[in-house]
Amino acid sequence: QVQLVESGGGPVQAGGSLRLSCAASGRTFSSYAMGWFRQAPGKEREFVATMGWSGGLTYFADSVKGRFTISRDNARNTVYLQMNSLKPEDTAVYYCAVSGSRWPKRAEEEYDYWGQGTQVTVSS
């Protein structure tokens, strides 16, 4: 019943921008923290960004800090990841997730629901 659907991925040249969206259904997630993770081929899934329920607390991986921003629209049950100044190293499948907590989380095991992912491919 709970579903998270990512969209907005695709091919992009280095230096370009993309905005990923994650629409949730089956439950209202306005009271929960949400996060973004990514997984590159042959690598473990890694934390990218997280935002608390109010949108006031955010954390970013060092690798994306200053380039990515996370936001949410609780009225639409949607979270966004704005990605700027993209690098080839950003190439990965990006996943959104919902935590059972109000507070931002950076560990995979602290999230309860996951989307199917959307591919981002950055060419040099």
Image (spheres, rainbow, N blue to C red):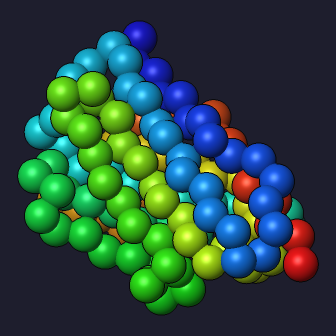
Choose top left, top right, bottom left or bottom right for residue 25.
top left
Q: Position of residue 21 (x, y in %)?
A: 49, 40
Residue 49 visible to the viewer? yes
Choose top left, top right, bottom left or bottom right for residue 78.
top left
Q: Position of residue 95 (x, y in %)?
A: 57, 48
Left or right: where does residue 81 sit relative to residue 99? right
- Residue drawn at x 47%, y 71% is 68
Q: Quadrant of the C terminus?
A: bottom right
Q: Nearer the viewer, residue 4 or 111?
A: 4
Left or right: where does residue 102 sit relative to residue 21? left
- Residue drawn at x 43%, y 84% is 66
Residue 43 visible to the viewer? no
Is 101 located above or below residue 49 in the figure? Answer: above
Q: Nearer the viewer, residue 74 or 38?
A: 74
Exactly how many numbered labels are in the figure? 0
- Residue drawn at x 53%, y 59% is 37
Is 66 located above or below residue 68 in the figure? Answer: below
Left or right: where does residue 79 sit relative to residue 121? left
Q: Position of residue 105 (x, y in %)?
A: 29, 64
Q: Quadrant of the N terminus?
A: top left
Is 24 located above or below residue 52 in the figure? Answer: above
Left or right: where does residue 105 sit relative to residue 80? left
- Residue drawn at x 54%, y 52% is 19
Q: Position of residue 64 (x, y in %)?
A: 52, 80
